[in-house]
Amino acid sequence: MGKITKQQLKLHEQTEELLWGSDKKLTPEQVAFCLEHWDPRALAGKQVARNQAYFTPLPLAIDAGKYIGGDGRQVVDIGAGIGRLAYAVLCANWWDAGRVKVTAVEINPEYVQVGRHLLPEVAWVQGDLYDLHLWQSLPRFDEAVSNPPFGQVLTDSDTGWIGYHGPAGLTVAAIGLRVARLGITLILPQTQTPYRYSGRRPGENICTTNHMRYLETFMAQRPALQWHHSSIDTEDETYKSGWRGASPVVELVSLNDPDAEHVPLRQHPHPSLARPLYSLALTG
Ligand SMILES: C[S@@+](CC[C@H](N)C(=O)[O-])C[C@H]1O[C@@H](n2cnc3c(N)ncnc32)[C@H](O)[C@@H]1O
């Protein structure tokens, strides 16, 4: 894991001052500044490594958000961090902000506290994404979005209900397919997708056949599964340089399985939300 630099720490401290230094409501520019510069590596302990908390580079999150929402959809961000993807979904759906609703599920209480402050219009849920009871206590979603942990599944919950054992990325994909009607759009390591799109020259064949065993199993269990890769080349420097403390090669993919068996969820309405005004203020 790359260490936080002095400059990054200074910017993080500015976000802390904005977040907790006064009771004043943050401006849209301040919200964007905090999402960009609040850095989990500034926290005590090994929280980033433990929860595989490599936040999505904000430009990549913003572009990924454009693939989500519309039609007043209920969206869940799985493993939401402080809400970069949730924010991106809201930004992309600003024209329909009264109807598109985002729920964020995150295990780390400190991230949830920051996320709640930055994005109060998001329904924040602190809990373990591998826990069936958590999903049964939430409403039915239309779409899921995630930049999941990429390594091993780390949890005390019983994961048998998910119907897949493999790396955390594909396990979250399997969860998304079970909790969201239209499937999940997520960032996966290239090794967990049947494509090599990012980093290739235009026109090159991107489909691969020599898959890792865990990917073969995932696909064999879901014969009707549809994969759509985005047109985002995540190896572009604009995105790639924004991973802090990691340099994964990833793809943005949308998965839909018409045969997916959805977890039966309790229905309850979302609170009605004020229309927020977003703007993106990237610095540095
Ligand atoms: C790769 S980070 C992505 C964060 C955020 N979605 C983003 O795009 O910036 C993965 C996130 O999943 C969270 N996470 C890891 N294990 C989890 C679990 N069992 N339940 C809920 N969240 C978890 C981490 O704390 C971290 O915030």
Image (tube, helix red, strand yellow):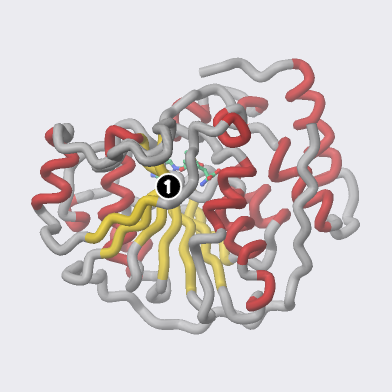
Relative placement, left or right, of 75 versus 122 is: left
- Foreground: 24 or 31? 31
- Residue at 84% x, 44% y is 18
- Residue at 33% x, 59% y is 176
Number of labels in the image equals 1
- Where does the C terminus fall, quadrant-wise? top right
Can you say whether 246 is above or below 35 in the image?
Answer: above
- Residue at 33% x, 37% y is 204
Element at label 1: strand
Can you say whether 5 is above or below 27 in the image?
Answer: above
Furthest residue toward front: 203
Q: In this orientation, does residue 83 appear?
A: no
Crowd class of label 1 (few under 14; some 14 to 19; many from 20; radius 10 Å):
many
Residue 56, position as x, y percentages in the image: 55, 40
- Residue at 62% x, 34% y is 238
Relative placement, left or right, of 216 versus 89 is: left
- Tell me the kind of residue under disc 1: Leu
Figure quadrant of residue 283 = top right
Read off the residue under disc 1.
252
Q: In this orientation, does residue 168 appear?
A: yes
Residue 180, position as x, y percentages in the image: 35, 68
- Foreground: 144 or 212? 212
Can you say whether 66 is above or below 235 in the image?
Answer: below
Residue 123, position as x, y percentages in the image: 57, 66
Residue 157, position as x, y percentages in the image: 28, 48
Relative placement, left or right, of 5 versus 240 is: right
